[in-house]
Amino acid sequence: MHAETRPRAGKPIAVAPRPDRRQQLRRWFQAGFFVMFVLAPPFDLLRYDLVAGHAWFLGMEWHVGFDDYSAGRIGLAGILGAVLLKVFLPILGAGAALIFTAWKWGRLYCGWLCPHFSVVETINRLMQRATGKPSMWESRTLPPREPDGTPIRYDRRWWLLTVPLAIAFAFTWAVVLLTYLLPPAEVYGNLVAGEPTRNQLIFVTAGTVVLSLEFLFARHLFCRFACAVGLFQSLAWMGNRGAMVVGFERARAADCANCYSACDHACPMRLKPRNVKQAMFTCTQCAQCVSACETTQRDNPQGPLLGWVAGDAARRNEAILAGQRPGAAGERR
Protein backbone atom coordinates (compact mmCIF):
# COMPACT_ATOMS: atom_id res chain seq x y z
CA MET A 1 0.00 0.00 0.00
CA HIS A 2 1.02 3.61 -0.44
CA ALA A 3 1.08 4.21 3.32
CA GLU A 4 3.81 1.60 3.70
CA THR A 5 6.21 3.69 1.64
CA ARG A 6 6.15 6.59 4.09
CA PRO A 7 9.34 7.13 6.10
CA ARG A 8 9.38 5.72 9.60
CA ALA A 9 9.23 8.03 12.61
CA GLY A 10 12.60 9.30 13.71
CA LYS A 11 14.09 9.34 10.22
CA PRO A 12 15.10 12.67 8.67
CA ILE A 13 12.41 14.00 6.36
CA ALA A 14 13.35 16.07 3.33
CA VAL A 15 11.44 19.31 3.81
CA ALA A 16 13.51 21.60 1.60
CA PRO A 17 16.09 21.49 -1.19
CA ARG A 18 19.56 20.46 -0.12
CA PRO A 19 21.33 23.53 1.27
CA ASP A 20 24.37 22.96 -0.91
CA ARG A 21 22.19 22.89 -4.03
CA ARG A 22 20.64 26.27 -3.22
CA GLN A 23 23.96 27.85 -2.36
CA GLN A 24 25.66 26.29 -5.38
CA LEU A 25 22.97 27.79 -7.60
CA ARG A 26 23.46 31.16 -5.94
CA ARG A 27 27.21 30.96 -6.47
CA TRP A 28 26.65 30.26 -10.16
CA PHE A 29 24.38 33.29 -10.43
CA GLN A 30 26.95 35.45 -8.64
CA ALA A 31 29.83 34.20 -10.78
CA GLY A 32 27.85 34.69 -13.98
CA PHE A 33 26.86 38.22 -13.08
CA PHE A 34 30.41 39.10 -12.02
CA VAL A 35 31.69 37.88 -15.40
CA MET A 36 29.01 39.93 -17.14
CA PHE A 37 29.97 42.96 -15.02
CA VAL A 38 33.58 42.63 -16.20
CA LEU A 39 32.87 41.78 -19.85
CA ALA A 40 29.96 44.13 -20.55
CA PRO A 41 32.20 47.08 -21.57
CA PRO A 42 34.59 45.13 -23.87
CA PHE A 43 31.62 43.61 -25.70
CA ASP A 44 29.76 46.94 -25.79
CA LEU A 45 26.83 45.46 -23.90
CA LEU A 46 26.54 48.48 -21.63
CA ARG A 47 28.87 51.44 -21.21
CA TYR A 48 29.18 55.16 -21.83
CA ASP A 49 32.06 56.32 -24.00
CA LEU A 50 33.27 59.73 -22.83
CA VAL A 51 35.60 59.95 -25.83
CA ALA A 52 32.90 59.29 -28.43
CA GLY A 53 30.23 61.11 -26.45
CA HIS A 54 27.58 58.41 -26.62
CA ALA A 55 26.56 55.17 -24.91
CA TRP A 56 26.70 51.59 -26.11
CA PHE A 57 23.90 49.10 -25.45
CA LEU A 58 23.80 45.47 -26.63
CA GLY A 59 26.49 46.16 -29.20
CA MET A 60 24.74 49.19 -30.70
CA GLU A 61 25.62 52.86 -30.47
CA TRP A 62 23.08 54.65 -28.29
CA HIS A 63 22.83 58.28 -29.39
CA VAL A 64 20.54 60.70 -27.60
CA GLY A 65 20.80 63.34 -30.31
CA PHE A 66 22.82 66.18 -28.82
CA ASP A 67 24.99 66.38 -31.95
CA ASP A 68 21.90 66.69 -34.14
CA TYR A 69 20.50 69.35 -31.82
CA SER A 70 23.77 71.33 -31.90
CA ALA A 71 23.82 71.12 -35.69
CA GLY A 72 20.22 72.31 -35.92
CA ARG A 73 18.91 69.10 -37.43
CA ILE A 74 16.36 68.66 -34.63
CA GLY A 75 14.61 71.21 -32.45
CA LEU A 76 14.08 71.55 -28.71
CA ALA A 77 11.05 69.28 -28.73
CA GLY A 78 13.03 66.63 -30.58
CA ILE A 79 15.93 66.59 -28.13
CA LEU A 80 13.62 66.59 -25.11
CA GLY A 81 11.70 63.67 -26.56
CA ALA A 82 14.92 61.79 -27.28
CA VAL A 83 16.21 62.35 -23.73
CA LEU A 84 12.91 61.14 -22.31
CA LEU A 85 12.76 58.08 -24.57
CA LYS A 86 16.42 57.04 -24.56
CA VAL A 87 17.58 58.13 -21.10
CA PHE A 88 14.81 58.51 -18.55
CA LEU A 89 12.48 55.73 -19.67
CA PRO A 90 15.18 53.00 -19.70
CA ILE A 91 16.44 54.11 -16.29
CA LEU A 92 12.93 54.27 -14.86
CA GLY A 93 12.06 50.90 -16.39
CA ALA A 94 15.11 49.18 -14.92
CA GLY A 95 14.51 50.88 -11.59
CA ALA A 96 10.85 49.86 -11.55
CA ALA A 97 11.76 46.23 -12.26
CA LEU A 98 14.33 46.26 -9.46
CA ILE A 99 11.94 47.88 -6.97
CA PHE A 100 9.09 45.51 -7.83
CA THR A 101 11.38 42.52 -7.37
CA ALA A 102 12.50 43.88 -4.00
CA TRP A 103 8.92 44.70 -2.95
CA LYS A 104 7.90 41.10 -3.57
CA TRP A 105 11.02 39.08 -2.73
CA GLY A 106 13.43 41.40 -0.93
CA ARG A 107 17.01 42.23 -1.89
CA LEU A 108 17.44 39.28 -4.24
CA TYR A 109 19.70 41.34 -6.49
CA CYS A 110 22.09 41.92 -3.59
CA GLY A 111 22.24 38.34 -2.39
CA TRP A 112 22.16 36.56 -5.73
CA LEU A 113 23.73 38.89 -8.32
CA CYS A 114 25.56 41.91 -6.92
CA PRO A 115 29.31 41.74 -7.73
CA HIS A 116 30.11 43.79 -4.63
CA PHE A 117 28.30 41.38 -2.31
CA SER A 118 30.18 38.42 -3.79
CA VAL A 119 33.40 40.20 -2.78
CA VAL A 120 31.94 40.84 0.69
CA GLU A 121 31.26 37.14 1.18
CA THR A 122 34.69 36.10 -0.13
CA ILE A 123 36.55 38.48 2.18
CA ASN A 124 34.29 37.42 5.06
CA ARG A 125 35.30 33.80 4.69
CA LEU A 126 39.00 34.55 4.40
CA MET A 127 38.98 36.99 7.32
CA GLN A 128 37.19 34.46 9.47
CA ARG A 129 39.91 31.95 8.66
CA ALA A 130 42.54 34.48 9.71
CA THR A 131 40.96 35.89 12.86
CA GLY A 132 37.88 33.85 13.73
CA LYS A 133 35.79 36.91 12.87
CA PRO A 134 34.14 37.64 9.49
CA SER A 135 34.54 41.36 10.11
CA MET A 136 37.07 43.59 11.83
CA TRP A 137 34.22 45.00 13.88
CA GLU A 138 32.85 41.67 15.12
CA SER A 139 32.70 41.72 18.92
CA ARG A 140 33.73 38.11 19.49
CA THR A 141 35.29 35.12 17.79
CA LEU A 142 32.87 32.72 16.12
CA PRO A 143 32.80 29.01 17.03
CA PRO A 144 35.49 27.18 15.02
CA ARG A 145 33.19 24.87 13.08
CA GLU A 146 30.88 24.79 10.10
CA PRO A 147 27.11 24.20 10.49
CA ASP A 148 27.67 20.53 9.61
CA GLY A 149 30.19 20.18 12.44
CA THR A 150 33.33 20.36 10.29
CA PRO A 151 36.06 22.01 12.38
CA ILE A 152 37.65 25.26 11.20
CA ARG A 153 41.22 26.07 12.08
CA TYR A 154 41.87 29.76 12.56
CA ASP A 155 45.32 30.79 11.44
CA ARG A 156 46.73 34.30 11.07
CA ARG A 157 48.65 33.17 8.00
CA TRP A 158 45.37 33.50 6.11
CA TRP A 159 46.06 37.26 6.20
CA LEU A 160 48.72 36.57 3.56
CA LEU A 161 45.87 35.69 1.20
CA THR A 162 43.13 37.98 2.55
CA VAL A 163 44.88 41.33 2.09
CA PRO A 164 46.36 40.68 -1.39
CA LEU A 165 43.02 39.31 -2.61
CA ALA A 166 41.16 42.36 -1.30
CA ILE A 167 43.63 44.61 -3.13
CA ALA A 168 43.29 42.50 -6.28
CA PHE A 169 39.51 42.79 -6.12
CA ALA A 170 39.84 46.55 -5.62
CA PHE A 171 42.19 46.89 -8.60
CA THR A 172 39.86 44.81 -10.77
CA TRP A 173 36.89 46.93 -9.77
CA ALA A 174 38.77 50.19 -10.44
CA VAL A 175 39.83 49.06 -13.91
CA VAL A 176 36.41 47.68 -14.80
CA LEU A 177 34.66 50.86 -13.66
CA LEU A 178 37.05 52.86 -15.84
CA THR A 179 36.11 50.75 -18.87
CA TYR A 180 32.49 51.80 -18.37
CA LEU A 181 33.63 55.37 -19.13
CA LEU A 182 36.52 55.01 -21.58
CA PRO A 183 37.09 52.64 -24.53
CA PRO A 184 38.01 49.26 -22.98
CA ALA A 185 40.59 48.54 -25.69
CA GLU A 186 42.40 51.76 -24.79
CA VAL A 187 42.26 51.12 -21.03
CA TYR A 188 43.43 47.51 -21.17
CA GLY A 189 45.94 48.24 -23.92
CA ASN A 190 47.57 50.99 -21.89
CA LEU A 191 47.68 48.81 -18.77
CA VAL A 192 49.24 45.86 -20.60
CA ALA A 193 51.83 48.17 -22.16
CA GLY A 194 52.47 49.77 -18.77
CA GLU A 195 51.66 53.19 -20.20
CA PRO A 196 48.34 54.40 -18.77
CA THR A 197 47.56 58.06 -19.24
CA ARG A 198 47.89 60.39 -16.28
CA ASN A 199 44.14 60.51 -15.67
CA GLN A 200 43.79 56.75 -16.06
CA LEU A 201 46.60 56.18 -13.55
CA ILE A 202 45.01 58.58 -11.06
CA PHE A 203 41.60 56.93 -11.41
CA VAL A 204 42.89 53.36 -11.07
CA THR A 205 45.23 54.22 -8.19
CA ALA A 206 42.64 56.17 -6.22
CA GLY A 207 39.98 53.56 -6.91
CA THR A 208 42.25 50.73 -5.80
CA VAL A 209 43.18 52.48 -2.55
CA VAL A 210 39.63 53.47 -1.65
CA LEU A 211 38.12 50.12 -2.57
CA SER A 212 40.87 48.20 -0.76
CA LEU A 213 40.06 50.08 2.44
CA GLU A 214 36.35 49.55 1.85
CA PHE A 215 36.71 45.82 1.21
CA LEU A 216 38.90 45.32 4.28
CA PHE A 217 37.22 47.61 6.80
CA ALA A 218 33.81 48.87 5.65
CA ARG A 219 32.27 46.42 3.20
CA HIS A 220 29.28 45.68 5.46
CA LEU A 221 28.82 49.36 6.28
CA PHE A 222 28.67 50.17 2.58
CA CYS A 223 25.97 47.56 1.96
CA ARG A 224 23.99 48.75 4.97
CA PHE A 225 24.23 52.52 4.77
CA ALA A 226 25.96 53.75 1.60
CA CYS A 227 24.57 51.67 -1.28
CA ALA A 228 21.60 53.48 -2.82
CA VAL A 229 20.54 50.39 -4.79
CA GLY A 230 20.38 48.34 -1.60
CA LEU A 231 18.69 51.08 0.40
CA PHE A 232 15.81 51.52 -2.05
CA GLN A 233 15.36 47.76 -2.27
CA SER A 234 15.12 47.55 1.52
CA LEU A 235 12.60 50.39 1.67
CA ALA A 236 10.42 48.70 -0.96
CA TRP A 237 10.67 45.38 0.86
CA MET A 238 9.73 46.91 4.21
CA GLY A 239 6.67 48.47 2.57
CA ASN A 240 5.16 45.05 1.79
CA ARG A 241 4.11 43.11 4.87
CA GLY A 242 3.54 40.02 2.74
CA ALA A 243 6.94 40.08 1.03
CA MET A 244 9.16 37.03 1.19
CA VAL A 245 11.06 36.90 4.46
CA VAL A 246 13.05 34.38 6.47
CA GLY A 247 10.44 32.89 8.80
CA PHE A 248 11.19 31.40 12.21
CA GLU A 249 9.03 28.76 13.90
CA ARG A 250 9.04 30.34 17.32
CA ALA A 251 6.88 27.56 18.79
CA ARG A 252 9.79 25.19 18.23
CA ALA A 253 12.44 27.52 19.63
CA ALA A 254 13.50 24.82 22.10
CA ASP A 255 15.00 22.92 19.15
CA CYS A 256 17.60 25.69 18.93
CA ALA A 257 18.99 24.68 22.34
CA ASN A 258 21.39 22.16 20.83
CA CYS A 259 22.53 24.57 18.11
CA TYR A 260 25.34 27.11 18.47
CA SER A 261 23.36 29.85 16.67
CA ALA A 262 24.65 28.66 13.32
CA CYS A 263 22.18 30.90 11.48
CA ASP A 264 23.57 34.02 13.19
CA HIS A 265 27.15 33.06 12.42
CA ALA A 266 26.36 32.24 8.78
CA CYS A 267 24.83 35.64 7.95
CA PRO A 268 27.31 37.65 5.83
CA MET A 269 25.54 40.89 6.81
CA ARG A 270 25.95 40.06 10.52
CA LEU A 271 22.20 40.07 11.22
CA LYS A 272 20.13 37.92 13.57
CA PRO A 273 17.82 35.89 11.28
CA ARG A 274 15.46 34.85 14.08
CA ASN A 275 14.52 38.47 14.69
CA VAL A 276 11.61 40.57 13.41
CA LYS A 277 11.66 41.96 9.88
CA GLN A 278 12.37 45.51 11.07
CA ALA A 279 15.66 44.28 12.54
CA MET A 280 16.48 42.55 9.23
CA PHE A 281 16.28 45.73 7.14
CA THR A 282 19.46 44.93 5.20
CA CYS A 283 18.78 41.21 4.67
CA THR A 284 20.00 40.22 1.20
CA GLN A 285 17.96 37.00 0.93
CA CYS A 286 21.14 34.99 0.43
CA ALA A 287 19.51 32.20 2.50
CA GLN A 288 22.77 31.22 4.16
CA CYS A 289 20.97 31.27 7.51
CA VAL A 290 18.28 28.96 6.11
CA SER A 291 20.93 26.61 4.74
CA ALA A 292 22.75 26.59 8.08
CA CYS A 293 19.53 25.77 9.92
CA GLU A 294 18.69 22.99 7.48
CA THR A 295 22.14 21.52 8.06
CA THR A 296 22.06 21.66 11.86
CA GLN A 297 18.50 20.28 11.94
CA ARG A 298 19.05 17.62 9.28
CA ASP A 299 18.29 14.83 11.79
CA ASN A 300 15.20 16.56 13.16
CA PRO A 301 12.02 14.85 11.89
CA GLN A 302 10.21 18.20 12.04
CA GLY A 303 12.75 19.83 9.77
CA PRO A 304 14.49 23.21 10.08
CA LEU A 305 13.13 26.16 12.03
CA LEU A 306 14.06 28.76 9.42
CA GLY A 307 12.63 29.00 5.92
CA TRP A 308 11.40 31.47 3.34
CA VAL A 309 7.76 32.46 3.81
CA ALA A 310 5.55 34.95 1.97
CA GLY A 311 2.02 36.31 1.94
CA ASP A 312 -0.13 35.47 4.97
CA ALA A 313 2.62 33.23 6.33
CA ALA A 314 4.99 36.20 6.37
CA ARG A 315 2.42 38.35 8.17
CA ARG A 316 1.79 35.66 10.78
CA ASN A 317 5.51 35.20 11.25
CA GLU A 318 6.01 38.89 11.99
CA ALA A 319 3.01 39.00 14.31
CA ILE A 320 4.30 36.07 16.34
CA LEU A 321 7.87 37.35 16.52
CA ALA A 322 6.59 40.76 17.58
CA GLY A 323 4.60 39.17 20.39
CA GLN A 324 1.24 39.98 18.82
CA ARG A 325 -1.69 37.68 18.25
CA PRO A 326 -1.33 35.92 14.87
CA GLY A 327 -4.21 37.77 13.19
CA ALA A 328 -3.08 41.25 14.12
CA ALA A 329 -0.62 41.71 11.28
CA GLY A 330 -3.18 40.63 8.70
CA GLU A 331 -5.68 43.17 9.97
CA ARG A 332 -3.31 46.09 9.44
CA ARG A 333 -2.52 45.66 5.77
Image (spheres, grey):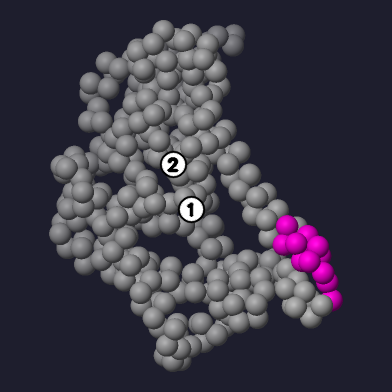
The quadrant in which residue 13 appears is top left
Residue that carries the numbered disc 2 in the rendered image: 284
Find disc 1 in the rendering and name its residue. 114
Residue farthest to the right, as pictured: 73
Q: Is residue 63 above or below residue 10?
A: below
Q: Residues within 10 Å of mark 1 (few under 14, many from 20)?
A: many
Q: Are marks 2 and 1 in contact (CB under 8 Å)?
A: yes
Which residue is at a point 15% across and 42% down the rendered structure image? 140
User: Residues under labels 2 and 1: Cα distance?
Assistant: 10 Å
Tell me if residue 148 can be seen.
Answer: no
77 within the magenta span: yes
Q: Is residue 229 magenta?
A: no
Residue 238: horizontal and vertical position, in percent? 48, 31
Q: Residue at x 25, y 66 (%)?
A: 163
Q: Is residue 48 visible?
A: yes
Picture coordinates of residue 78 (x, y %)?
81, 65
Label 1: element kind: loop
Please state which amino acid type lies under the numbered disc 2. Answer: Thr
Q: Quadrant of residue 127?
A: bottom left
Q: Amino acid at mark 1?
A: Cys
The N terminus lies in which quarter of the figure? top right
